[in-house]
């Protein structure tokens, strides 16, 4: 694996866009549930993270129903899910807000899972990635669909050291669950 230069341990920021949501009439945006496809894709995202040996030490999740349910279905695929923090600031956050929340993560966490919304997550990935393996950057620029997972690697003594251009985008996957 190619690693970004820097001091400190290798860290990974795993960015997961919530699974496909429904648009029921009369339901506030924050309360929108997952659509049937989202309920299939969220567990597939959890399995993909396990297969890639990319399980987090901590998860930060938007408080929106669709993000919380994505977390629950993905984490149910793991033996012992990590702690999760639901943070209202992640709901429709832009890059400055997302980075502020990430910068608060304790230094002992080496792999962090961030579950939230577009366009903020896509912008965050593109802001943090100074480079990418293969066509990963082009793929994110083209589209960061629901259930997409981007993995950013970097070296730093603390999460406060994560800055624009500091990370390497090592993978982008879009897990899809089969129809039941």
Image (spheres, rainbow, N blue to C red):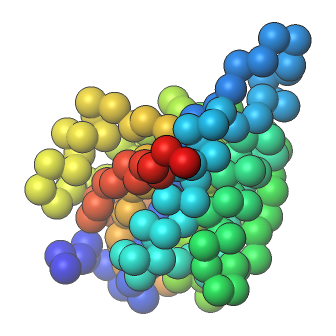
Is 50 left, or right, of 101 in this rendering?
left
Give the percent coordinates (x, y) of residue 149: 43, 54
Residue 152 location, x and y as percent?
A: 37, 63
> Where is residue 25 drawn, in percent x and y?
81, 11
Q: Is residue 52 left or right of residue 82?
A: left
Q: Residue at x 61, y 79 (%)?
A: 78
| Residue at image point 65% right, 33% down | 35
Q: Nearer the viewer, residue 132 or 127?
A: 132
Q: Quadrant of residue 48?
A: bottom left
Note whether 3 is above or below 8 in the view shown: above
Q: Residue at x 76, y 69 (%)?
A: 84
Looking at the image, which residue sits at the far left? 134
Q: Position of residue 13 (x, y in %)?
A: 48, 66
Whether 109 is drawn above or below 48: the answer is: below
Q: Residue furthest top?
A: 25
Q: Evaluate whether residue 148 shows in this view.
A: yes
Q: Between 27 and 128, which is closer to the camera in this rendering?
A: 27
77 left or right of 69 in image = left
The structure residue drawn at horizontal position 19% and vertical position 79%, both measured from the top left corner, is 1
Is residue 96 at least partly visible in the picture?
no
């Amino acid at each position: 694996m190619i690693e970004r230069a820097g001091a400190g341990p290798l860290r990974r920021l795993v960015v997961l866009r919530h699974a496909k949501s429904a648009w029921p009439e009369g339901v506030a945006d924050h309360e929108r549930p997952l659509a049937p496809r989202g309920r299939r894709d969220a567990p597939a995202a959890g399995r993909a993270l396990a297969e890639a040996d990319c399980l987090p030490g901590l998860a930060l999740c938007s408080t929106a129903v669709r993000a919380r349910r994505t977390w629950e279905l993905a984490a149910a695929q793991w033996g012992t899910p990590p702690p999760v923090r639901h943070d209202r600031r992640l709901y429709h956050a832009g890059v400055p807000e997302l980075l502020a929340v990430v910068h608060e993560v304790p230094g002992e966490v080496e792999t962090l899972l961030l579950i939230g919304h577009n366009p903020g997550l896509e912008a965050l990935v593109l802001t943090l990635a100074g480079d990418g393996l293969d066509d990963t950057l082009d793929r994110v620029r083209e589209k960061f669909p629901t259930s997409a997972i981007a993995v950013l690697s970097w070296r730093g003594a603390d999460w406060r050291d994560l800055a624009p251009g500091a990370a390497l985008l090592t993978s982008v996957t879009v897990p899809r669950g089969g129809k039941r």
